[in-house]
Amino acid sequence: GDSVTQMEGPVTLSEEACLTINCTYTATGYPSLFWYVQYPGEGLQLLLKATKADDKGSNKGFEATYRKETTSFHLEKGSVQVSDSAVYFCALRRGTSYGKLTFGQGTILTVHP
Amino acid sequence: DVKVTQSSRYLVKRTGEKVFLECVQDMDHENMFWYRQDPGLGLRLIYFSYDVKMKEKGDIPEGYSVSREKKERFSLILESASTNQTSMYLCASSYPYRGGTEAFFGQGTRLTVV
């Protein structure tokens, strides 16, 4: 079945440091890939997405590129802020699955001033 | 703005009680989902529905049931609550899959079973 694996957390960074959160997936066909973010006390909200190989999703300074050859969708940001502290989830969605999302285990990011 | 609203942010229930978690969406979405969120496990799908009165089991349906009598409302039912059902429950809705169609989430219900 489908699966998503994220790097182990939690991740603690100083403000303005570079961020990479690794995400790899296993799925048949050509899934769409997503990063969702969960701020403290809130539900999940979409951060960015990519629907086909070599697509780059970007939003709020975050980027991720759909790499089919390595089945990866790593999240990157060049300079993190305290306000980026949250839980980040990588997810995939296939067209044959009623649009069900399969999530990774989540990565807690804490950014210190 | 799309809104997915869960009826409670926090709930405390006793073991053996029947528990209802309610979710309402205002975007006329066909698909609705219930996920459970636990630390280190991410989100796991309990049940989903792709139309009124239609439902499908997800990955962890044991101990749960659902009801969808109206398009905008999707209820999760814990038939007899147990302490291992203490968790964060998230409802989501979306259009049927079309490329990168995203799912929209409610704010979550943190359920404690004592």
Image: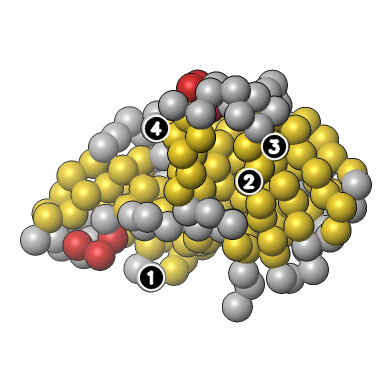
Could you tell me the amino acid type at mark 2?
Leu
Q: Which residue is mark 2?
A: B21
Q: Nearer the viewer, residue B17 or A40?
A: B17
Residue at 79%, 68% (x, y): give it.
B28
Q: Which residue is mark 3?
A: B77
Residue at 73%, 70% (x, y): give it.
B27
Q: Quadrant of the C terminus of chain A?
A: bottom left
Q: Residue A42: horizontal and vertical position, in percent?
A: 42, 57
Q: Earlier in the sequence, mark 2 or mark 3?
A: 2
Distance from the alpha carbon under mark 2 to that under mark 3: 6 Å
Q: Which residue is mark 1?
A: A60
Q: Is residue B83 left or right of residue B44?
A: left
Q: Residue A95: horizontal and vertical position, in percent?
A: 79, 47
Q: Is residue A100 visible?
A: no
Could you tell me the amino acid type at mark 3?
Ile
- In the rendered structure, are the residues bearing label 1 and label 3 in contact, judged by CB atoms less than 8 Å apart? no
SS label for mark 2: strand
Q: Are discs 2 and 4 both within one chain?
A: yes
Mark 4 Cα-neighbour bin, 10 Å: few <14, some 14–19, many ≥20? few
Mark 2 Cα-neighbour bin, 10 Å: few <14, some 14–19, many ≥20? many
- In the rendered structure, are the residues bearing label 2 and label 1 in contact, judged by CB atoms less than 8 Å apart? no
Where on the picture, by quarter, is residue B97? bottom right
Q: Nearer the viewer, residue A74 or A10?
A: A10
Where on the picture, by quarter, is residue B1? bottom right
Q: Residue A103: horizontal and vertical position, in percent?
A: 55, 39
Q: Which residue is mark 4?
A: B39
Could you tell me the amino acid type at mark 1?
Lys
Residue at 33%, 55% (x, y): give it.
A40
Q: Nearer the viewer, mark 2 or mark 4?
A: 2
Q: Nearer the viewer, residue B51 or A48?
A: B51
Distance from the alpha carbon under mark 3 to that under mark 4: 22 Å
